[in-house]
Amino acid sequence: MSDPAVDVVEFLLTAHTYTEEDDLDEDDLPPRYRQVFWSDGSIERPLAVTQDRARTATSVDHPWDAVSDLLFTQRTEFSGEISLTQPDMALEWYLDHADEDRLAANPTLAYAAEHADVEVGVTREQAREDNQPIQADRVWIDSLLDEYFDEDDDAEMLDLVHILAPEEIETTLDDLVLTEDQNDEVNKIVTAIENRDYLASIGLSEIGKILFVGPPGTGKTTISRGLAHELGLPFVEVKLSMVTSQYLGETAKNVEKTFEVAKRLSPCILFIDEFDSVAKTRKSDEHAALKRAVNTLLKSIDDISLVRDEVLTVAATNHPDQLDAAAWRRFDEVVNFPKPDRQMRADILRIVTQDMQMGDFDPEVVAEETEGLTGSDLRMVLREAVLQALTEGRRELTQQDVMNAVQGFEERDNLKNMDMIDGEGAAIAGDGGHDHDHDH
């Protein structure tokens, strides 16, 4: 368990050191500290520590009470500001009480230790490499959007773009079961991002445009978000079906501005879902606005680059047959997302249930009985099993609970083949999506 005094002293020391040392910048502050000091698009010195700021940054309910008995702390009664009277003593006390992991997550204090000639096992540069950059913070993302996009003029476009900061993405790559090809592609992407300067120096700029192909629920969105979390990059998601259906007359402009958002937030991942809804086989009777949107989309993909713009572009489609040759040519990699085989299903079940209370559960047996189900389907099955057990007053799941949920899922899934259930008001939408058809 964390020591409240150490937490508060770390925050005070960080604020003091950052205020005093002009060599430090925002990337030297841990994300949880940056957020409390962020104002009007920047962090301005000096950094004043109030009770509220300390409480938010450290999660200590009574910050002053935690450090009031230390000889090097003081509080100004009028403002409530907490500060250090003897920073050198505070640093010495902190280094005696903090472990190396704390310093590895705080470049500012790693810097302070270096300049105090204290050997702590981690340098400022090492800590900065492991510290989430300011570009990945929610506050930075919001301030940049406010700076470059007008709340009124760009409201429609911004409503169509979903932006996640890495800290808001719960899924990690460790939570996913990947095919060998998918795993190879992830490694390739990470390597390309880490070597952008080298790729630029040898003239390889047209990379980092990837097409994910596969049925709903196979992980196209999830792996993209997991990659953003892993790399500490903002995730910019746009569903092209929304762009085309809601504002047809503005489609081309909104497509163009979507790419502008990605460039402003770079480095980031731009994820274009339902890619086939615009970049589909073009017919002579197609709406003129849609034609313009297709051309704008393809040109925008041409004009964006991982190496030059620091934007990884990932498009996803459930209907590759609807893409024409011009759309296919824009991507340097195409990654297949098939429905999981038996072993992958078993592995997915193991991962999803790792934090659940399981009784006599054999994922291999369940995997054998769930052919054709996607990862999203399996998560829904387990969710239903948990809810059913809870209604019976139990938290431990059994094999029978899971198999009952599988049967219930399959029975419900069969409804998609029915046009109507007998009885007034019980219509089933023939073309409707089903819960498990979403690619999560």
Image (cartoon, helix red, strand yellow):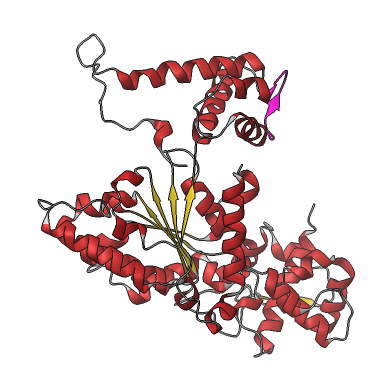
- Outermost top residue: 422
380 is higher (above) or lower (below) than 149: above
In terms of depth relative to the viewer, which is nearer, 383 or 89?
Answer: 383
Residue 355 in magenta stretch = yes
Image quarter of residue 99: bottom right
- Outermost bottom residue: 22
User: What segment is highlighted magenta in the picture?
Assistant: 354-362
Tell me, yes or no, if residue 172 can be seen here. no
Q: Is residue 421 left or right of residue 340?
A: left
Tell me, yes or no, if residue 359 can be seen here. yes
Q: Residue 176, how many percent across, how many down?
A: 60, 44
Q: Is residue 175 left or right of residue 71?
A: left
| Label total for image | 0
Residue 314 in magenta stretch = no
Image quarter of residue 51: bottom right
79 is higher (above) or lower (below) than 102: below
Q: Residue 169, how many percent across, how many down?
A: 54, 53
What residue is shown at x 50% (from left), y 28% (from top)? 373
Q: Is residue 130 left or right of residue 217?
A: right
86 is higher (above) or lower (below) than 215: below
What residue is shown at x 66% (from left), y 58% (from top)? 59
- Outermost left residue: 285
What residue is shown at x 89% (from left), y 79% (from top)? 119
In terms of depth relative to the viewer, which is nearer, 74 or 317?
Answer: 317
What residue is shown at x 69% (from left), y 59% (from top)? 62
Q: Main secondary structure of the magenta part?
A: loop
Image quarter of residue 332: bottom left
Q: Is residue 388 left or right of residue 101?
A: left
